[in-house]
Image (cartoon, rainbow, N blue to C red):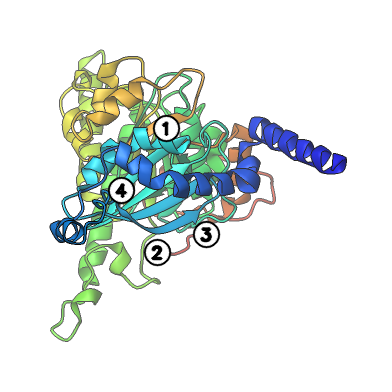
């Protein structure tokens, strides 16, 4: 008996230590079982307390009166499945007639408290079926990405969501994106992580860094073109527009619109072209967009209009040509001049790190997800990398990028330097690598992209 008590004390002490120091390990060893039992045992009473039950049907009430039996209890949504994950539980429920998915979403905070979970989010899978994703601990406090991640040239993992899911940057679904954030908010780390993931894919990277290249030039071996000042940026954007027009000519020449060609094989963008003819997709990263829009003289104003016009054309027409924009900045409002709001309207993906004022958050989410504005303002300064990601559907979620050091990003770009495509239209803007690359550096080759 004494040894049994000692073993029990050691197990409890180990569980407490794991919960304090390694919450992910605690969840996988102890937490998931305890949480599943707690949810299943409390389910009926919690649903009743949260107002998520419906009265029994009339025929059951009539039958109970007829045979003099107790009145049936209210019915909670039926549990379809309980599935444990590496960060929490997934509970799938079937709503009763008369219930609405909005009622479940509005009760998530009460369900979180009642079930003893760290967080709960809900989404409607189909009519009458709702999925509750529960997290057992703060997954954003120490970001640990899953070991196995899905990666394609146009879909890469960039962050972890607060519900434990991986947040992907899908360029074919969301071609262009805007990333906002104050100084030291984690915006640069987000961009660095994006470049690290893209470096291993057969895509061309084009950078515009008007801070004299201090952010992007260390990664130059993997870039097909770089601009470190507004004048060069204007010429580079004009070259991208010309390249886009050439790609459209290629698509028109290979559209295959004969009567005997199935509709699915008619080419309307680069992904419909044969692999041997498909141009390499291009991701354009703009580090600080305000530096492209500010001006002091008439000549700088003309340059500014030229830059914004080119960016707007790429945002409106670049998707089919495989050109995708990643625009970063601290603010992106109408005070930057004409054409800015038109450009912002084309940027479907929105990510906001910590901002200094509510108006900056409104620039990101005011026109697509007003509820996300308050969430962006509430990000604490001591949690760099935490951001709010939203899209044009009105949905949003808190995410956090794993910390990626500059050395790690540089190593990734150096390791995959042989994947850097050589684009003739952008050859004048290819960064000079004589001082960076070793004498035996492999030659850059262009490889067709695959979806």
Graded by Cα atoms within 10 Å as few (under 14), some (14 to 19) or many (20 or more), the crowding at tag 3 reads few
Mark 2 vs mark 1, CA separation in Å: 43 Å
Labels 4 and 2: the sequence-earlier one:
4
Labels 3 and 2: the sequence-earlier one:
3
Q: Relative to the observer, which residue lies in front, 91 or 45?
A: 45
Labels 2 and 1: the sequence-earlier one:
1
Say which element carries label 2. loop
Q: Position of residue 305 (x, y in %)?
A: 20, 28
- Is residue 377 visible in the rendered image? The answer is yes
> Would residue 64 appear left or right of 78 to someone viewing this image?
left
Labels 4 and 1: the sequence-earlier one:
1
Mark 3 vs mark 2, CA separation in Å: 19 Å
- Quarter of the image for residue 11 reads top right
Numbered tag placed on residue 451 in the rendering? 2
Q: Position of residue 350 (x, y in %)?
A: 31, 36
Labels 1 and 3: the sequence-earlier one:
1
- Is residue 165 visible in the rendered image? The answer is no
Numbered tag placed on residue 445 in the rendering? 3
Closer to the eye: label 4 or 2: 4
Closer to the eye: label 3 or 4: 4
Q: Relative to the observer, which residue lies in front, 202 or 15?
A: 15
Question: Tags 4 and 2 in contact by the CB under 8 Å rule?
Answer: no
Say which element carries label 4. strand
Mark 4 vs mark 2, CA separation in Å: 28 Å
Q: Position of residue 235 (x, y in %)?
A: 32, 37
Mark 3 vs mark 4, CA separation in Å: 45 Å
> Would residue 425 appear left or right of 364 to someone viewing this image?
right
Numbered tag placed on residue 113 in the rendering? 1
Graded by Cα atoms within 10 Å as few (under 14), some (14 to 19) or many (20 or more), the crowding at tag 4 reads some
């Amino acid at each position: 008996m004494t040894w049994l008590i000692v073993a029990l004390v050691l197990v409890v002490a180990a569980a407490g230590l794991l919960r304090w120091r390694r919450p992910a390990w605690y969840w996988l060893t102890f937490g998931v079982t305890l949480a599943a039992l707690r949810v299943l045992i409390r389910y009926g009473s919690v649903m009743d307390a949260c107002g998520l039950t419906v009265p029994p049907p009339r025929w059951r009430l009539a039958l109970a009166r007829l045979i003099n039996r107790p009145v049936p209890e209210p019915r909670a949504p039926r549990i379809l499945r309980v599935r444990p994950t590496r960060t929490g539980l997934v509970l799938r429920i079937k709503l009763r007639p008369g219930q609405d998915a909005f009622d479940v979403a509005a009760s998530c905070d009460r369900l979180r408290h009642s079930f003893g979970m760290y967080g709960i989010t809900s989404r409607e899978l189909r009519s009458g079926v709702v999925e509750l994703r529960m997290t057992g601990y703060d997954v954003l406090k120490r970001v640990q990405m899953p070991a196995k991640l899905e990666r394609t040239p146009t879909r890469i993992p960039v962050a972890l969501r607060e519900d434990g899911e991986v947040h992907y940057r899908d360029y074919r679904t969301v071609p262009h994106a805007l990333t906002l954030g104050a100084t030291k908010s984690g915006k640069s780390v987000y961009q660095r992580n994006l470049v690290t993931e893209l470096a291993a894919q057969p895509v061309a990277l084009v950078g515009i860094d008007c801070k004299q290249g201090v952010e992007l030039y260390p990664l130059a071996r993997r870039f097909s073109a770089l601009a470190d000042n507004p004048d060069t940026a204007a010429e580079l954007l004009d070259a991208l527009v010309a390249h886009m027009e050439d790609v459209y000519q290629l698509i028109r020449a290979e559209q295959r619109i004969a009567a005997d060609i199935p509709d699915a094989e008619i080419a309307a963008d680069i992904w419909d072209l044969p692999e041997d003819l498909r141009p390499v997709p291009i991701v354009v990263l703009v580090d600080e967009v305000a530096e492209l829009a500010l001006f002091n003289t008439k000549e700088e104003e003309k340059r500014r209009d030229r830059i914004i016009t080119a960016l707007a054309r790429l945002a409106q027409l670049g998707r089919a040509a495989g050109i995708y924009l990643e625009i970063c900045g601290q603010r992106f409002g109408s005070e930057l001049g004409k054409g800015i709001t038109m450009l912002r309207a084309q940027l479907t993906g929105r990510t906001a790190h910590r901002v200094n004022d509510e108006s900056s958050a409104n620039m990101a989410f005011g026109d697509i997800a007003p509820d996300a504005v308050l969430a962006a303002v509430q990000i604490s300064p001591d949690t760099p990398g935490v951001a709010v990601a939203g899209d044009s559907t009105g949905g949003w979620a808190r995410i956090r990028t794993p910390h990626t050091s500059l050395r790690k990003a540089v190593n990734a770009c150096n390791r995959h330097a042989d994947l850097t495509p050589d684009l003739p239209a952008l050859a004048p803007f290819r960064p000079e690598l004589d001082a960076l690359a070793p004498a035996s550096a492999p030659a850059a080759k262009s490889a067709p992209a695959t979806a």
